């Protein structure tokens, strides 16, 4: 077994490439300096000849004037050849070098002089400009204008070559935006770490980290602010990982931490928890304050897989699981998690077909009054029932739909089917509940969106007030005037508007005042553990107070325990949604749930 790192993991010899290094090292000409003693311009030519004869190694002699300024570089071959000619020694032997240089018979090129503080790249440019022969003959080096020594052009070339190699190495192995290892270097290190672990009987862990709703951050603040957010996240990841861990960027908002040489898998959860806690601190971006949460999945080698190839996709599957149960959390891999191999299927194409073949369906989750439990409404959540892969959660296919534009067709499908379901329940004699649907930015910005809503409401004979659109903050922040116009059109129909995942975006108060919003949904990341996490309680309390001052309704999502309900009631949040009341259910199971609930309420009354 080869225990040394593979070639591609090694930076070029002599160059320590680290994540923090700038692409170009600033090596100066001083590092090439050879302090060869110069000859003075008054010295006679025989004196120079003697120096050449005394030292066969000396290829050229630098000549300086009275003030120490470099004036010429006498090359051994041409000098010796000149003095081996007839009469040259007699005529010029006792005359000074100055006389020789000014006589016109001895040809000496103007020497190339470069300041020692000059970078090697700049020196190379100067040499290329002055004629490539200086690469061979070398050049003189000055220090603040005075002679300091000579340099060999070949040394310069070899430094430049090594720099180029280091640059290429860097580009191939490091992420240009954040300066941390990229996928290629991570793969090399992972392979090496696993081999090392086999030998020492240790463990290796991968943490797959995905920033929650990063697309919204990018969409609303712009790409350069998005880049800055990523850099700040990387700083927190590094601070949360152990010094020896590799923090790498896979792509976009996906990061991986490689933990080598582990003895106890519990260390993985420790780091994951540290990362999640580190994200609590709000990020101040150009006056906008945002909380960027992450979802983390982990896999441990060889416990979860004795091969290296599938580790990353298993960590990815665990990360998706963390997202599916409400984001801002951590999951370890377990075998029932499905791994998604992008190479083996084109999710986009399958989704396109899936929409056409009616493979989508809606699940419904009730929204209730926290005091008394009356059912106030229902949220429609899309599901994809894939013929081979079973039920695929929306967080796996909504991003694909958004990127490919399929979200428009998908979103229309959701609105149409949610209203059709309301109509069907009403026809069955069930109570008329308002239904909320999630609307993506692209769908919202479609021309004629409000016309489409009006058409659907009329077709299914549903009162507009029974339809609520859930928009995220990022939808509202871009092109404010156009957004306001669409919101006003929708409001004029009588349709209700809610802001989803409130608190995770930029919480800009000005838009809340301007836009005709009816309700805020407190994001589940603030609701989770609200009974034991004071910062969550403070945030939720601030959101409730804000909603109150603007006369908006408020609903908390992701409620899982009775003690979370208690805290929410205490801070005056009156509506809630979450697994505690019911998980999202298909239409049939939802109506059974509703009927049973109505019956139990009658019995209790
Ligand atoms: N851990 C936990 N989770 C809870 C609890 N109560 C509800 N949830 C989950 O939280 C998510 C709430 O929806 P969301 O924030 O709008 O987040 C939604 C929404 O952003 C998106 N999505 C779902 N359906 C649609 C749709 O029709 N159109 C669009 N554009 N997006 C959709 O996918 C996201 C995830 O949807 P789901 O997987 O159905 O996940 C749902 C729901 O199942 C709880 O007590 N604990």
Image (cartoon, rainbow, N blue to C red):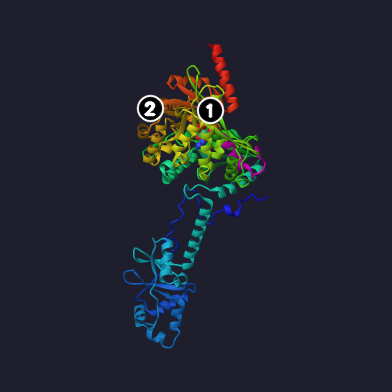
Q: Name above or below for residue 495 compared with residue 409.
A: above
Disc 2 residue crowd, few under 14, some 14–19, many 20+, Cα 10 Å: some
Mark 2, mark 1: which one is toward the viewer? 1
Extreme-left residue of the structure:
67
Residue 420 drawn at (x, y percent): 54, 31
Estimate the spatial distance between the alpha carbons at disc 2 and disc 1, rounded to whole Å.
Answer: 35 Å
Residue 278 drawn at (x, y percent): 47, 35
Provide the residue designation for mark 1: 423
Task: Inspect the magenta stretch and tell me whether residue 308 lies in it.
Answer: yes
Q: Is residue 512 left or right of residue 272?
A: left
Which of marks 1 and 2 precedes in the sequence? 1
Ligand 1: does it lie within 8 Å of the C-beta at label 2?
no
Q: Identify the residue at image location x=57%, y=43%.
A: 352
Compare residues 141 and 497 and report the one nearer the observer: 497
Say which mark, if any, is on residue 546.
2
**Element type at mark 1:** helix
Q: Which residues are magenta?
A: 302-321
Disc 1 residue crowd, few under 14, some 14–19, many 20+, Cα 10 Å: some
């Amino acid at each position: 077994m080869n225990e040394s790192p593979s070639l591609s993991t090694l930076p070029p010899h002599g160059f320590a490439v680290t994540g923090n290094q700038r692409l170009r090292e600033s090596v100066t000409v001083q590092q090439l300096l050879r302090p060869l003693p110069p000859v003075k311009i008054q010295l006679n030519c025989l004196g120079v000849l003697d120096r050449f004869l005394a030292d066969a190694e000396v290829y050229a002699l630098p000549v300086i004037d009275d003030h120490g300024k470099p004036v010429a570089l006498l090359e051994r071959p041409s000098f010796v050849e000149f003095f081996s000619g007839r009469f040259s020694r007699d005529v010029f032997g006792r005359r000074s070098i100055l006389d020789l240089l000014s006589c016109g018979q001895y040809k000496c090129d103007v020497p190339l002089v470069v300041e020692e503080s000059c970078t090697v790249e700049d020196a190379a440019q100067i040499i290329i400009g002055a004629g490539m022969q200086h690469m061979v003959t070398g050049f003189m080096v000055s220090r603040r204008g005075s002679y300091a020594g000579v340099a060999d052009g070949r040394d310069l070339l070899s430094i430049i070559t090594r720099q180029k190699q280091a640059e290429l190495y860097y580009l191939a192995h490091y992420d240009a935006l954040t300066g941390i290892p990229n996928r290629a270097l991570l793969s090399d290190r992972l392979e090496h770490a696993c081999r090392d672990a086999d030998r020492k009987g240790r463990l290796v862990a991968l943490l797959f980290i995905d920033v929650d709703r990063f697309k919204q951050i990018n969409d609303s603040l712009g790409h350069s602010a998005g880049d800055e957010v990523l850099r700040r996240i990387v700083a927190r990841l590094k601070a949360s990982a152990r010094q020896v861990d590799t923090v790498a960027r896979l792509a976009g908002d996906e990061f991986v931490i490689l933990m080598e040489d582990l003895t106890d898998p519990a260390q993985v959860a420790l780091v994951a928890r540290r990362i999640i806690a580190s994200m609590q601190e709000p990020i101040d971006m150009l006056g906008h304050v945002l909380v960027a949460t992450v979802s983390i999945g982990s896999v441990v080698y060889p416990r979860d897989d004795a091969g290296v190839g599938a580790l990353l996709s298993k960590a990815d599957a665990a990360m998706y699981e963390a997202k599916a149960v409400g984001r801002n959390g951590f999951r370890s891999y377990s075998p029932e998690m499905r791994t998604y191999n992008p190479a083996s299927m084109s999710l986009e194409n399958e989704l396109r077909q899936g929409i056409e073949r009616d493979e989508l369906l809606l699940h419904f989750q009730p929204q209730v009054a926290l005091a008394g439990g009356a059912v106030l409404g229902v949220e429609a959540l899309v599901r994809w029932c894939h013929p081979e892969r079973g039920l695929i959660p929306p967080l796996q296919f909504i991003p694909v739909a958004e990127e490919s534009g399929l979200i428009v067709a998908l979103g229309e499908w959701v609105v149409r089917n949610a209203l059709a379901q309301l109509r069907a329940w009403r026809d069955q004699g069930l109570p008329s509940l308002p239904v909320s649907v999630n609307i993506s930015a692209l769908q919202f910005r479609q021309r004629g969106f409000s016309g489409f809503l009006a058409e659907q409401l009329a077709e299914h004979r549903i009162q507009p007030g029974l339809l609520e659109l859930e928009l995220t903050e990022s939808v509202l922040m871009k092109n404010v005037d156009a957004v306001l116009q669409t919101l006003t059109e929708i409001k004029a129909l009588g349709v209700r508007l809610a802001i989803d995942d409130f608190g995770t975006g930029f919480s800009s108060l000005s838009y809340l005042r301007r836009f005709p919003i009816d309700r805020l949904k407190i994001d589940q990341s603030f609701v989770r553990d609200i009974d034991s996490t004071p910062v969550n309680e403070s945030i939720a309390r601030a959101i409730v107070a804000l909603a109150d001052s603007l006369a908006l309704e408020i609903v908390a999502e992701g409620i899982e325990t009775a003690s979370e309900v208690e805290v929410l009631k205490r801070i005056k949040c009156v509506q809630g949604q979450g697994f505690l009341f019911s998980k999202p259910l298909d239409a049939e199971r939802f109506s059974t749930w509703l009927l049973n609930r109505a019956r139990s309420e009658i019995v209790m009354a």
